[in-house]
Image (cartoon, grey):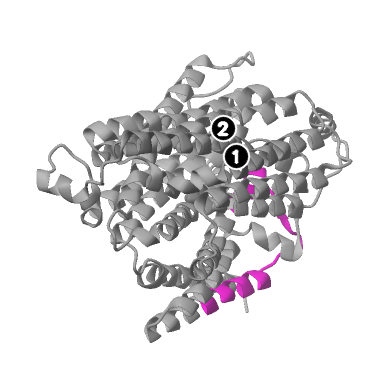
Amino acid sequence: MSTILLTYLGYGFLVASVLGFLYLLFAVLCKGQPLGLLWLGLANTGERFGYYTMLAVFALFLGENFGLETGTASTVYSSFLMLVYFLPVIGGVAADRFGYGKMVTVGILVMLVGYLLLAIPLGGVTPTGDVDWTAFIAMILALLLVSLGTGLFKGNLQVMVGKLYDSPEYADKRDSGFSLFYMLINVGAMVAPTAAISIMDWAQQSLGVTKADSYHFAFGVACVSLVVSILIYFLSSRSYRHVLTTEKASSKEKQTVAAPELSASETRERIVCLCLVFAVVIFFWMAFHQNGLTLTFFARDYVQTSSTGIQSMMFNVMNLWAIVGIVYGIYCYANAKERLNKLMSCLVGVVSAAIIVVQYLLLDDKGIKVEAPIFQQFNPLFVVALTPISVALFGFLAKKGKEPSSPKKIGLGMLVAALGFFVMIGASVGLLSPLAQADAIESGADVARVSANWLVTTYLVLTFAELLLSPIGISFVSKVAPPKYAGLMMGLWFAATAIGNFLVQVPGLLWGADVNLTIIWGTLAGICLVSAIFIFSILKKLEKVS
């Protein structure tokens, strides 16, 4: 069979797999969930696809386009992440006053302007080798707009999702609903690194632009995906309109959605417990979001730059999607009750497996080049693939009355995160320090590089931690937050995440200071362990309010 025929056959199987997955999403996965969950999730998927397309290459862009050193790039990167997660505090306060729907709309439009500004190639370095301050200031302005728009959009959209479960008929599906919502977000994030690398390669090879300018094409992809997100959000408004808090709502509507008033002491106790959880969240995100910084630097400088054979297949996003299709085909077959849905589940699984077979037949003996940003596809892949397993496991434990409480899941998440960095310690033993490695690479020396499997394993372990902490934490906040402070509490969740993201630069600064790799990873592992111990020490207090 010719290579061209196999290639088109692979694309055909991919289209069939995606369409089948969408069918299962409607008919099986979201069955029993409020309809608004699916549409709000898909709207967020488009926005997150754009965001992670930009973020996959952003740290590298700062060095390539502006010539920033590692420490300076780390500070810019972490400051941007801090703003992305801090500004939902302002967005939450604004939503409590003006309504969630209005703030989501304003936020997504502001983001679009920011991405458009990023997509314009204004230069980076002057002929004398200095930073082009006009281009740098324009980039800062674009980052501020993206941060502000995200602050108005992200937290308030998740509050809207939480309000879908205020109805008694959906109350017991809150955790599983947020897990599905989180899965949909990561579908977009999974494809983002490949989109960024592909559009940059196309721009360089077909249009002849420089590598520095090609980054702007990746930012342009974010603009397109945001437009799709806007369309989904507005066209599906009927499915979630009942949860919007607006000044135009009738008193009867407000009475319908109003929650029972809490006493002052109950309110205070809930706020204190949430703040304790927020303290732990700071250190989780400090460790977890190394994926865009020191873990990306590790991928660039220490991981083998090519891959052959079966290992190379994991860098093809079509194979990653096939894994998702197989997992969800099996899961939906086990949970579907109608014959048609079971048949569709089988078809999705079989067609997805066929994708892998075709890609195996198309393997090139020469192997493929492995770009550093591509590793960022593995975390969202694992989130998407492991979500049905997580939902099934905790659903089984819930039926047995043995499901861990939300606070206990958060503590376990911190323990698992520590394990992820112990894997990195194992990968780094015997390697040169960061600056020594960079100097050796620049001089053309033959440096030691490790298998990509080390970094992929780390992403797998960190994803287990993320699934235990992030969607469960958001669910915990939406459930425990006093009703009149719902927007503010969700905003403070993101504020804690913001502080953690600002601290992301600390390992980056250690990297720039030429600290031994095992010390960098050991520091992160230790922080996660201490945070886990803290959560378990206050577990009873947290479980009391949940």
Mark 2 sits on what residue?
A: 500
Amino acid carrying label 1: it is Phe
Mark 1 sits on what residue?
A: 284
Start-end of magenta stretch: 349-378
Q: Badges 2 and 1: C-beta atoms under 8 Å apart?
A: yes
Q: Is residue 288 left or right of residue 444?
A: left
Location of residue 290 (image quadrant): top right
Estimate how packed mark 2 is, as few (under 14), some (14 to 19) or many (20 or more) residues with alpha carbons within 10 Å: many
Q: Was residue 372 drawn as part of the magenta stretch in this picture? A: yes
Element under disc 1: helix
Q: Which of the two labelled residues, at mark 2 and mark 1, occupies the earlier sequence position?
A: 1
Viewport quadrant of the N terminus:
bottom right
User: What residue lies at 61% left-to-right and 16% top-to-bottom?
Assistant: 127
Amino acid carrying label 2: it is Gly
Q: Is residue 287 left or right of residue 385?
A: right
Prevalent SS, magenta region: helix
User: What residue lies at 79% left-to-right and 33% top-to-bottom?
Assistant: 519
Query: In this orientation, does residue 250 appear?
Result: no
Q: Was residue 139 drawn as part of the magenta stretch in this picture? A: no
| Spatial separation of the CA atoms under disc 2 and disc 1 | 7 Å
Q: Is residue 162 above or below residue 111?
A: below
Q: Position of residue 147 (x, y in %)?
A: 43, 31
Q: Position of residue 390 (x, y in %)?
A: 54, 62
